[in-house]
Image: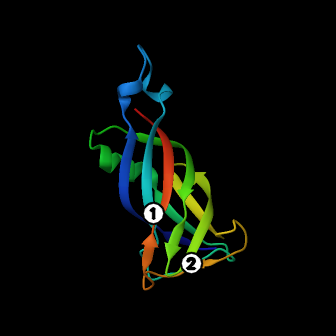
Amino acid sequence: MAVVAGTVQAVELVRGPDDAYGNEIATGQMLSASLSIWNDTSSVVNAGTPDTLDVNAATAIQNARRDGKTVTVRTAAIVQTLVVGSTAYAGTITLSSNTVKITPQTAAWSGTPTIPANTTETKRYYRVVVGYTVA
């Protein structure tokens, strides 16, 4: 099993604190961000091994927020498949602290595909929506 460091191409802060209610504590308010993730390494991601494509989502979101607050990832979900070359890849997610771990699946949500290295053109990134809190 290998961990391949995924690259966050973009972060979109979906919701800000504008929907907070009076006296709500910071850790009680769930915010969300959308991350575009891909394999920008010379390594393949072989689901049969099983390899995972990992990113520290908290760091990516903190860098996008630029307000000095600490982000804690609470949940994550893939909402768009990755397309590399002419192949689409679905995936499943697990969380390990603030790290989002993507295990590739075929476009039919089964099987153990291999995501190619960055020498094959990425046409669409994984889109992952992350729920998080700040403190």
Q: Mark 1: which secondary structure?
A: strand
Residue 122: give x, y in percent of width and height. Answer: 44, 75
Q: Quadrant of the C terminus?
A: top left
Vertical arrangement, residue 104 with respect to residue 97, above or below: below
* Marks 2, 1: nearer the viewer: 2
Q: How many marks?
A: 2
- Mark 1, Cα crowd under 10 Å, few <14 / some 14-19 / many 20+, is many
In this picture, is 24 found above or below 112?
A: above
* Image quadrant where residue 35 sits: bottom left
Answer with left or right where residue 80 lies relative to residue 8: right
Left or right relative to 37: residue 106: right
**What is the three-letter code of the residue carrying label 2?**
Thr
Foreground residue among 115 and 123: 123
Q: Is residue 94 above or below residue 30?
A: below
Residue denoted by label 2: 87
Q: At x 56% / y 78%, what residue is drawn? A: 87
Q: Looking at this rendering, what residue extends furthest in the front direction?
A: 86
**Image spot of residue 128 (x, y percent):** 50, 54
Q: Which mark is residue 37?
A: 1
